[in-house]
Image (spheres, rainbow, N blue to C red):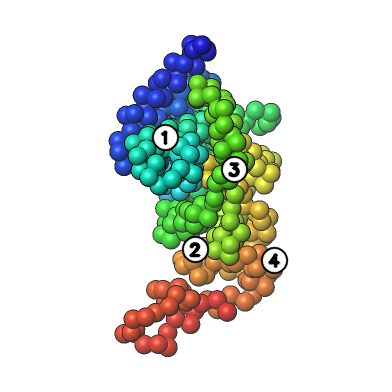
Amino acid sequence: MFGNPEQMAQAMRQFADMLSAPQGSGPVNWDMAKNIARHAVVAQGDPSVMEGERRQIVEALSLADLWLNEATTLPSGVSNPQAWSRSEWIENTIPIWRKLCEPIAERMVETMGGALGGSGLPPEAQQMAGPLMGMLKQMGGMMVGQQIGQALGSLAREVVGTTDIGLPLSDTAALLPGGISSFSEGLEIPADEIRLYLALREGAHHRLFQHVPWLRSHLLGAVEEYAKGITVDTSALEEQIRGLDINNPEAIQEALSGGNLLKPEETERQKAALARLETMLALVEGWVATVVDQAAEGKLPSAVALAETVRRRRATGGPAELTFGTLVGLELRPRRLREAGALWRALESERGLEGRDALWGHPDLMPTADDLDDPEAFVRGEAAWDISQLDTKPKDEPNDEPNDEGDGEGEGGKS
């Protein structure tokens, strides 16, 4: 009658978590999601970071930061290097996941509340059933929270740092000894070289995220914009929920699989957000790869092999990408990584490090998706850029207010 006692106990704990969620706290009980994620990694083994491991990570990030000084003009973004366990990674990245996941979670909870409560009821009946509907939405929030918690727990077992998916999940540069160990499996490369190479990538990402003021909001804003256009397949959700056993966490996770339920709207706004995100991810990854290759040249014998391993992992996708797709309905992949790398190398050859890195000074200076098709043309055509000529507003933004500085300025936009 009561099924598996362990599953029953887990269901009761989650029900208690659901009831403990404060009113108005949002569509997801994030405390519950965080607890589920931490239980998931602990069940697979998540030892605390030992002092020796912490020292190795800190030294690798510090040394990598020195090497990066020779490969880029952007200043250091590593002020407090840290080594995290998987549980600490979950704890420290939850604020960004909350920002990324809540647009989708809200849609799923609203739709699930209607599916569980019978959205076809007459208005009078729905009003009478108000308290019950509220509880059903809480139950929907619990189910979505469980899915997010399981997904984050899975992702925490794959990542090596805070920038694996190309987005700034934390202001702190950190590496996970457990993640590095998993990454190293099957590679016949000394552990210290692998650790230092991954530290170079972590440090390079943080130089961008810390010292390019517009980049963080640009990337996260594009993800949010795309997520707002995601819809939930109501008929598929109702089919999944029908007969769902609340005591079976595995069944709930399978039922809420984002790939089956989340569908993007094919609107121009949606397509523009996706194109902008994919292009910027490729530019970020291409710049990081270029800078890291240069910083490691002549210092890390296995740098070329490690670069190819990372490129293959990013280009083909993996568990981390699948998990992200489940959370926000989006495949986060820099599809044009090689083209972006070629563009950054061409810029460096033509203008040097300072000219290459100067493009990060303003979003209007950045190459577009079309520029990735012909990097050499972009380099030749943009040689006369002068950032001082840029308006404070993007060129295509309407200006309804009189401009005290005159109407003849701001001609520095792309032609």
Q: Which residue type does callout 4 highlight?
A: Asp
Pinpoint residue 155: horizontal percent, then vertical percent. Answer: 54, 34
Q: Mark 4 to mark 2: distance in Å?
A: 20 Å
For the point 42% across and 88% down, which residue is it?
408
Helix, strand or loop status at disc 2: helix
Q: Is residue 91 visible?
A: no
Label 3 to label 2: alpha-carbon separation: 45 Å
Q: Earlier in the sequence, mark 4 or mark 1?
A: 1
Going 49% across and 79% down the picture, which residue do you hit?
Answer: 412
Q: Position of 342 compared to 231: left or right?
A: right
User: Who comes first in sequence, dot 3 or dot 2?
Assistant: 3
Disc 3 residue type? Ser
Looking at the rendered structure, which numbered label has been put on residue 235? 3
Query: Residue 136's mark?
Result: 1
Q: Amino acid at mark 1?
A: Leu
| SS state under label 4 | helix
Task: Please name whichever residue, 60 or 91, is drawn nearer the observer in this view of the structure.
Answer: 91
Q: CA distance from mark 3 to mark 1?
A: 18 Å
Q: Sequence-wise, which precedes: disc 4 or disc 3?
A: 3
Going by the numbered disc 2, the residue's amino acid type is Trp
Q: Are marks 2 and 1 in contact (CB under 8 Å)?
A: no
